[in-house]
């Protein structure tokens, strides 16, 4: 309950770390200490505030969320990631998730998300 209450504050903090990659606003969060369901709620909160791509790494899972009017889709971005890292997943234009990846590789993605546009 406390984490849910603190979520808007966390989102505000994370939005300060937005980077621009190939003309797209991207936020990448290592959420390996948290719960995947919480990561999903946080990602949805982020994309409701800005036109942005949100990437959350949570151990061996990855979550991609994309704002409603964004020209890229979450499922296409996830496919790029899965082609590079292995694993499986799927989703919609706004939200996609995958798993079965190496947690170490997910940490690399979160540390430098630029490479997903180079695939």
Image: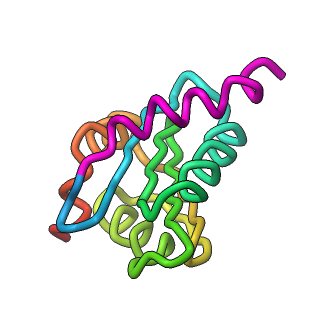
User: Would residue 46 be found to the left or right of residue 19 on screen?
Assistant: right
The tally of labels here is 0
In this view, the residue in front, 38 or 18, is: 18
Q: Can you say which quadrant of the picture contains the N terminus?
A: top right
Q: Quadrant of residue 6?
A: top right
- Residue 2 falls inside the magenta stretch: yes
Q: Give the image location of residue 88, x and y in percent.
A: 52, 64
In this view, the residue in front, 49 or 64, is: 49
In this view, the residue in front, 40 or 16, is: 16
**Residue at 49% over, 70% down:** 74
**Residue at 65% over, 40% down:** 36
In this view, the residue in front, 50 or 64, is: 50
**Residue at 45% over, 53% down:** 54
Residue at the far top: name it: 2
Q: Can you say which quadrant of the picture contains the C terminus?
A: bottom left
The vertical placement of 76 against 98, above or below, is: below
User: Would residue 34 be found to the left or right of residue 113 on screen?
Assistant: right
Q: Quadrant of residue 25?
A: bottom left
> What's the coloring here?
rainbow
Q: Give the image location of residue 68, x and y in percent.
A: 56, 74
Q: Give the image location of residue 26, x and y in percent.
A: 34, 54
The vertical placement of 103 against 49, above or below, is: above
The magenta region covers 1-19
């Amino acid at each position: 309950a406390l984490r849910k209450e603190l979520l808007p504050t966390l989102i505000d903090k994370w939005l300060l770390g937005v980077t621009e990659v190939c003309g797209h606003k991207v936020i990448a969060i290592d959420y390996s200490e948290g719960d995947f369901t919480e990561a999903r709620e946080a990602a949805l909160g982020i994309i409701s505030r800005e036109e942005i791509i949100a990437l959350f790494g949570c151990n061996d899972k990855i979550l991609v969320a994309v704002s409603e009017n964004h020209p890229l889709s979450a499922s296409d971005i996830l496919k790029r990631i899965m082609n590079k890292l292995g694993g499986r997943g799927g989703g919609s234009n706004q939200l996609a998730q995958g798993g079965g990846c190496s947690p170490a590789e997910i940490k690399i993605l979160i540390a430098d998300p630029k490479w997903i546009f180079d695939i």
